[in-house]
Image: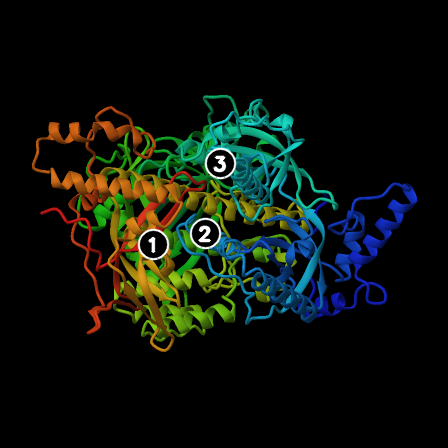
Amino acid sequence: MPSFSFPNMLPNVMAANMMGLGLGGISLLQQQQQQFQSQLQQQSSQPQRKSLFAPYLPQASLPPLLATGKLVVGILRVNKRNRSDAYVSTEVLDADIYICGSKDRNRALEGDIVAVELLDVDEVWGTKKEKEEKKRKKEENAAYEVKSATGRKNDKKKDDVEVEGQGLMLFEDEEVTDEVKPQFAGHVVAVVERMPGQLFSGTLGLLRPSSAATKEKQEAERREREGDRGDEPRRPIDRPKIVWFKPTDKRVPLIAIPTEQAPPDFVQNSEAYANKLFVACIKRHPISSLHPFGTLVEELGPIGDIEVETSALLKDSNFPTEDFSESVLKCLPPMPWVIPDHEYDVRTDLRKERVFTIDPEGAKDLDDALSVKLNDDGTYGVGIHIADVSFHVKPNTALDRDARKRATSVYLVQRVVPMLPPALSEELCSLVPGEERLAFSVVLTLTKEAKVIKKWIGKTVIKSAAKLSYGAVQGVLDGKPLGDVSVAPEHEVSSVENDIRLLYDLAQILRTRRFKNGALRLESPRLSFKLNDKGLPVDCSQNVYTEANVLVEEFMLLTNTTVAQQIAVALPEQALLRRHDAPIDRRLNSLVERAEHLGYKLDVSSAGALMRSFSAIKDPTALSVLQLLSFKATHRAKYFCAGMLDIAKYSHYALNVPLYTHFTSPIRRYADIMVHRQLESVLQGSTESNTKFNMDRDAVAKVTQQCNIKRDSAILAREQSTHLFLCVLISDLTSRYGPVIRQAKVIGVLDAAFDVLIPEFGIEKRVHVDQMPIDNHVYDEHSHTLQIYWSDRDVITWLADNSDDEHLKKVKENAEQHAVKMEVASRSVHDEKALFDEDDGDDEIVLGRDSEVEKEIESVQCEISKTKATPEFEGLKTTPTGHKIQQIKELMTVPVIVTADLTKSPPVIKVYSVNPYAEHKEQPRQ
């Protein structure tokens, strides 16, 4: 499809132009539909299928409509909870455009770049309310079918809970609610661009889910009517023309697949494939069809398998799972490669400088290094040396096109999916110690007060003296020696240690000044895992941000800001920059209200004011909760082309700087390669009459758009990978030791639920009162407390007995087995194993577990589960009438049961409150 850039128009002009569209009140889409229907009638006298959607405007008609402001281009996102609601984010309006219903969304998918025509908000809002009212009355009229009505509500509730459980964090509700009318509304008139080769993971079914439920009901009625006991031979199944692909992403519609593409025995044996993951793509979506038609691409394997699920999440994120193509690899220089002699003539030789890298343990893509030395005048020369990846990745080559398509490396728990072939990312470009490498260097002259008084930027040749880990650097800052770290023989280990301490001292000053000047840093939970020799998780812990991280971060931020200033001045129309919008008022106001509930007052007038508010909070739990809520309230930073936006929108909210870009990680980010190319053109231009860069602003804007989409996808893939490994770990802990019980912090109280944060797992979940064995619950909106009136039933037992969830039944069975194990704990190990041998085959499958004796690996989480400490409760009281009450309020600690269901894809984490009054609680180990 052709590409379009965002029109550079003021929001009020854009809105005014768009509100008077079409002829005589008829929208552009209605005109197009009338023309389309007229053409059909002229072409054929045969009856046509009814159009469910409007035809798209011709691509050729879009540029003039965009240029005059009659249409706007933006990126579509679909509400995870309700696919009927969608939103289009655009640079030219002050708020997102609300898209109401599938008809107005017009077959567009999550992430599509769409052309939108604005509609009258009041009309759209009125139509939405009318539909909701009709739906409510329909449910009321069907109330006599209690089972049916209740079933539909329960199915919706079950879907919502499942969506909540498929990520690490609860996602924020979208702007549109019953109380908040959107500022803009519109409908999609064309899909300008869809991610090429977009794939979806999912399952294959013989019938549509709604049809399957109906057919199951009809079959049950037939058996009852005919006295069929179910043991007669199954009736042959008619071979349908299509089967149904159900994407794991609930925002994507069901896809009709030709039956001949399904496995040969699928029609007669569809149940055998119920737990298999497939990959499909959408080929077309006619205006006369409710669902798109697609192609089955491949069968991935069983749901729950780590590698299968990893392949699925990469496919969903549109990242390749296969090796680099032959055409890409042909762009690489023959090995062994040496730096051409010419490069030594045109570059500054810094090979004698004491340069070293600081990276996570085991990192191979080393693209940044540091050096520092004391100058004769008492100032410091700090060098930030970045791998010159652009030397190897030439524009418009197969390698360049592939890197641009990928746009970023993807960091999963067990591996990295690189943006560049390993020969580059791990060898030729990686700043490995002892090897001469091409670099872009930024050398800053700093005073003792860490003020930059001079800067030099140029292409260099460097030779790293040492590869340091964050842990080793932190050890030096803690007063320990570097130890067994290998340092080049021409440099002293003690000199490297002194450099580390000196760089940290300067970084501290830079950091203090940065926050004093109004910067903001928000911490979000990040998990790391310990894997066994089979690649399965045995432990997890929160990443700790250390002084070593501060050292590296401060100089990378300073370098990126320095380069941004350089290219923005020299290339005002083409500079690739990065900006961060301030949070919208609605979210800030909500954050202030939440903070007040917790007993804290936040100043959200600026990023710096918010940071100062955080600095005043002494309670670490309250601080972590409020920082998490603030993190969720902010936008993600975005790349943009300087010439496409008003300069007032260039700034970076969190860093509180007017200009920023990404320059320091070219091995793993394509945006940085672009910035390197721009910087090179600037450096060349300084010796010529003017600066020239060989891409116009529309082309640069196109690259920023791709980088933004792929960066968001990479973040999602990383989070899904973390979620997958956490689910496997929780499932394994449950299988080994019984239900996983952890202490959680209450971070929000609702009328029929409360939200908790489980720090050691880095997850935020919602606990629903209808998933508890309770007699009643009472919510006090003034004190924001929830009183739970408990029965005496154990939660897991009650859930298993009152649910058709096979996973919960397995958890209950597992808990009962472990309760028996506790009773026979005094027996010999041989006796205990013998007692449970017959049940081993019925246990829920835990990935990678087999009958071999596994060697013990030290694991904090295993020890916690094995110890089975007695849960500690707060807010308990028993009334004179015998009611057993637990009061839930924000920031209190509550014990919760954490379960992980690996039979779903993605797997689902659910959290349940422990009943403090249960009569049959599992007893703690003595």
Tell me which residue sits at (47%, 62%) in the image: 634
**Where is residue 46 drawn, in percent x and y?**
88, 41
Q: Nearer the viewer, residue 753 or 298?
A: 753
- Look at the image and tell me whether residue 421 can be seen: no
Tell me which residue sits at (46%, 70%) in the image: 588
Tell me the kind of residue under disc 2.
Answer: Lys
Quadrant occupied by the N terminus: top right
**Where is residue 293 drawn, in percent x and y?**
67, 38
1 or 3: tag closer to the N-terminus: 3
Numbered label attached to residue 380: 1
Q: How far, Cα to Cα, is label 2 from label 1?
A: 61 Å
Q: How far, Cα to Cα, is label 1 from label 3?
A: 50 Å
Q: Is residue 499 above or below residue 272?
A: below
Tell me the kind of residue under disc 1.
Answer: Tyr
> Depth-wise, is mark 1 or mark 3 nearer the camera?
3
> Depth-wise, is mark 2 or mark 1 nearer the camera?
2
Which residue has dot 3 on it? 312
Tell me if mark 1 has few (under 14), some (14-19) or many (20+) residues whose alpha carbon lies within 10 angstroms of its own.
Answer: many
Q: Quadrant of residue 674?
A: top right
Q: Please, which colouring scheme is shown?
A: rainbow
Tell me if mark 2 has few (under 14), some (14-19) or many (20+) residues whose alpha carbon lies within 10 angstroms of its own.
Answer: few
Q: Secondary structure at mark 3?
A: helix
Q: Nearer the viewer, residue 868 or 316?
A: 868
Tell me whether circle 1 and circle 3 mark residues in contact (CB < 8 Å): no
- Look at the image and tell me whether residue 54 can be seen: yes
Q: In the figure, is residue 234 to the left or right of 550?
A: right
**Where is residue 837 drawn, in percent x and y?**
21, 27
Tell me the kind of residue under disc 3.
Answer: Ala
Q: Outermost residue toward the bottom? A: 782
> Depth-wise, is mark 2 or mark 3 nearer the camera?
2
Which residue has dot 2 on it? 158
